[in-house]
Amino acid sequence: MAPIDKMSNIVAVIQARENSTRFPSKVLSKINGKSIIQIIHTRLKRSKKINKIIFAIPNNKKNKNLEKHLKNKNIKYYKGSEKDVLDRYIKVANKTNAKHIVRITADCPLVDPFLVDKIILKYFKEKADYASNTSPASFPDGMDVEVFSKKILQKLKKITKKISDKEHVTTLINEISCKKINILNKKDLSQENLTLDEKNDLWKIKKIFDHFNPKQVFSFEKIEKALMKLKLLGVKNKLRNEGFKMSIGQKFWRRAKNSIEGGNMLLSKREDRFAPNLWPSYFSKSKKCFIWDLNNKKFTDFSLMGVGTNILGYSNPEVDNAVRKTIEKGNLTTLNSPEEVYLAEKLINLHPWASKAKFTRSGGEANAVAVRIARAAAGKRYKIAICGYHGWHDWYISANLSNSSNLKNHLIDGIPSSGVPKNLKSTIFTFKYNEINDLEKIIKKNPDVGIIKMEVMRNYPPKNNFLKKVRNLANKHNMILIFDECTSGFRENFGGLHMKYKVYPDMAVFGKALGNGYAINAIIGKSEIMKYANQSFISSTFWTERIGPTAALKTLEVMNKTKSWKKISLIGKKVKKAWVKLSKKYDLKISITGLDSLCSFNFASKNNLKYQTYITQEMLKKNFLASNTVYISICHDKNIFNKYIKNLDNIFKVIKNCEKNKQNINYLLEGPIKISGFSRLN
């Protein structure tokens, strides 16, 4: 063992910050009245080998509360670069004349001072340059300790270039020629987790401290026994050191799920619909068909394009400038905005069969408004025959009250109807697209069905004059026909898709692309039906704001000028042809559905969802947001199309090998399999 004088100038440096992405201010969280900072400091003070304890924190305003806390508790600290944590360590070593450093992170409140001393002793005894208990790991994540010389820090400084490596300090340790040793636990507990990364971790750590309360210092051996007694062994919610590989967006998604039920407000934007644990989830800015994530990494969006809202591309300058002028003049006041009148007149002019309009700000509520008006007009025949997807409201989900599979092919199989009043049972009846007999049976069996509500087209075009037959049935039985054009509107023509087929409804609903990213939805209809809106209460403050109709008016102007529907349909046709070509090239059976400008494909394979996940995974590496569905915008030019197909070609080649059992898709996936998206009836 080295003499004690040679073991002098050993400084424990704990990197800490207040602005954690997944769990902000976690280091100031309290357990039994003490902050995480205080707990770590108290535990490390029990070390007999450490000479000084220094907290290395970022030098910025985001960490002012942390600095104040350290000052108040008389705990020594150093302020340095936020991103270059390696530099923080070097500066601390220089200021304290440290010859040897013990590296601890502030997300390890259970750090064991006795284990620290054990590693320090072995470090000196074996005259090592670097010692740890992480290479390979056998202790739980959260018990990590590293001991190394100042010289090692200086060597790391010379070879470390990436920001991520500078943040994690010792990631390149294996690239340095030096003597390294590792301490192993008697039992492999490397899959256990005791780190404080997310809010959900706090309960487990608190439970351990509660078990030993009022003691704050106890060994890992006692922690291990407590874990068994408290039945906390095997309670996992994340992978070891997963934060190292996660982008800011992935970390932010974890954070969101702690405060937002389900993580967000739209099912289609959840990461499990693409590539779980890999999808960037959040954006910082967007332009044309490009999105920058929270790491400022630029992606080409060849997937949902805002879930169909941005036909003109993200941040269209003409639309945005019109909105800016509106903001400068004022958005919402006691008086009404004239733009809503102009927009109503424009939509009625585009659809001469209609004579009145109403506006909302989301598709679900627009459909609910249309249903309310139609039911008021239909009187006792208030029940509805539906086909397709029409939102989340009670009237629609009530279809599943009588049978949980009624919306199976319209929305999601087995969608729960919890929270939907039971007395709405048997008020909604579903029929299949292109199956006129289905609708006829519903009408014959249920004379109180007075409304037909459907999407004009989603996956397949109408066959055998299906839409005309629906219109004829509505006329024959004096029923109100509503076309939901939230998704299909303005994609194949300048207006509702029904105009292409020359079948005109009594009411129509528009949304999605109408405002090119700004919230605006419209209900238009015949005056003899729309007048019933006055016999019901349909009213909302934010339906009168000015930005929505302003954006819609300018969007329609730009659409008309650029003939956007022609452009996106042409690009979509090319995409479909390319998919077919690739499938034939690699002998893969696929089915292609949807409008040309909104198309999807699926593999005829039991591994369909795995292949879709793999596509997203591999396309992310090429800086593409892509899945098996694409909403085309006018910004998807030839160059972007060619890059997309080139990358997809390589992926299809691998998928072929998987189908031929030459490769295993399970080994290729770097995360969980995506959850199936919407499956539409039509």
Image (cartoon, helix red, strand yellow):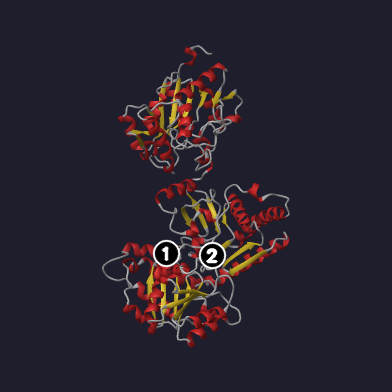
Q: Is residue 210 left or right of residue 470?
A: left
In the rendering, at what x and y percent does residue 654 appear? 69, 53
In the rendering, at what x and y percent does residue 334 appear? 26, 68
Q: Nearer the viewer, residue 4 or 321?
A: 4
- Disc 1 element: loop
Give the residue displayed 49% in from the left and 47% down from the top.
250
Dot 1 surroundings within 10 Å: few (below 14), some, or many (20 or more)?
Answer: many
Q: Nearer the viewer, residue 71 or 121?
A: 121
* 231 w.r.t. 254: above or below: above
Q: Nearer the viewer, residue 96 or 533?
A: 533
Mark linked to residue 632: none
In the rendering, at what x and y percent does residue 506 appear? 44, 81
Q: Is residue 192 left or right of residue 48?
A: right
In the rendering, at what x and y percent does residue 589 appear? 69, 63
**Quarter occupied by residue 542:** bottom left
Spot the residue most to the front: 229
Spot the residue most to the left: 334
Mark 2: amino acid: Ser
Q: The C terminus lies in which quarter of the figure?
A: bottom right
* 486 w.r.t. 173: above or below: below
Residue underneath mark 2: 633
Q: CA distance from mark 2 to mark 1?
A: 16 Å
Spot the residue most to the bottom: 476
From this viewpoint, is residue 328 visible? Answer: yes
From this viewpoint, is residue 313 visible? Answer: no
Mark 1: amino acid: Tyr
Mark linked to residue 518: 1
